[in-house]
Image: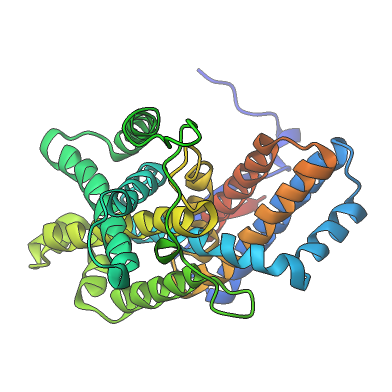
Amino acid sequence: MIPAAPSAFRGFGRLTLDVRQDLPAWKQAAFVGLSLVFGLAISVAILAAAGIPPLTLGNELAGVLTAESLRGVLVQAAPLILVGLGASLAFRIGFWNLGIEGQMIFGGIFAAAISIYDVGPQATRLLLMGSAAALGGALWVLLVLFLKNRFRVNEIIATLLLNYVAMYFLFHLLYGAWQDAKTAFPQSSPFRPFERLRDIGYGINSGLLIAIAGVLAAGWLIHLSRIGFYTRFISANPRMAKIVGVPVQTATIWIIAASGACSGLAGFVNVASQEGRLTQSFSNGYVFSGVLIAFLSRNDPIVIAVVGFLIAVLFIAGQTLQVFYQIPFTMVQMIEAIIVMAVASSEFMIRHRIRWLR
């Protein structure tokens, strides 16, 4: 027989955990905002321990928003917005797409193939490269969906492992048939001028226009199209959705393909604007960024554009810290991971309520 708790301890009460039935949007935003502030505070503390005073860090962030640095921010924002869209579309139907880097790699490979094999006229070369990149990313993620449906392979494991397959296939090309013959470096030959995404004025690269078009298309797909309406049923209860007649398989295929296409376009934007050729590392570090942007934006395509810009500021500031303060890139990635975990924890508070009962 278990003895009763002493009466001296009964007065302290106990914690209970309740499921929230409904929470106003402003309170949800408040929980996300507080979690973000908490993650940023931890990040500032880590950087302070590494020798960067908070005031200096603030000055570096402010310097990123100057006219000279803003162009670099906008160039970096384009692929970040696209990978954020790729992650959020998949998350909307409960598909954990962590293969963003692999889809970017195949997007870059398909785009580079159009250049290397001189496919199509010069006037439509960029359109062909972008379309091929979207196709490459979509096919690579649909392979994961096939493995999940046919062999019940968990998509988290499949997407993560296929990232390595894509990476080593890229190495195979760059150390082999696609290696630059002039420099003998493991990279492709430079793209020709008509195969590069150019600036359209005011420091804005045309890659940003692709990202904005992706935001508008994703917004239409989620909020206005029939498939977007179906995704609400699928994310809530896939079995019930199938019972009431929702074409679950068709809607899932379209959403997952769109997710991979966005990531593939991000690869195209990187190789056709920043890199100017296919390189080994053009997709590094985008998995955490895509997940972070999707979480911070609550999977809303319009908010993703704003969050993507802010993460681009963080990226450029991180590069500045690397140069002037010898901060390793892994620390920048760690800060992103801290922010992801902090924002993810806000989901618990949004869905649950902790009460102290006496």
Query: Which residue corresponds to the image point at 83% horizontal and 57% vertical from the top-left?
Result: 60
Question: Which coloring applies here?
Answer: rainbow
On screen, residue 178 versus residue 68, left or right, reads: left
Q: Nearer the viewer, residue 308 or 21?
A: 308
How many numbered discs? Answer: 0
6, 169: nearer the viewer? 169
Residue in the image at 39% along x and 43% along y = 98
Q: Is residue 189 above or below residue 162?
A: below
Please state which of residues 341 and 202 is positioned toward the viewer in this rendering.
202
With 43 as the anchor, is 293 left or right in this view? left
Which quadrant of the structure image shows residue 317?
bottom right
Q: Is residue 265 left or right of residue 336?
A: left
Q: Is residue 351 visible?
A: no
Q: Up-down: is 230 above or below 202?
A: above
Residue 132 is at least partly visible in this image? yes
Q: Nearer the viewer, residue 138 or 24?
A: 138
Residue 53: x and y in percent read 91, 47
Residue at coordinates 29% horizontally, 48% vertically from top-left? 113
Query: Residue lying furthest front in this view?
Result: 182
Q: Is residue 239 above or below residue 52?
A: below
**At 63% from the left edge and 49% from the top edge, which residue is drawn?**
339
Q: Position of residue 67 (x, y in %)?
A: 75, 73
x, y percent for residue 161: 34, 30
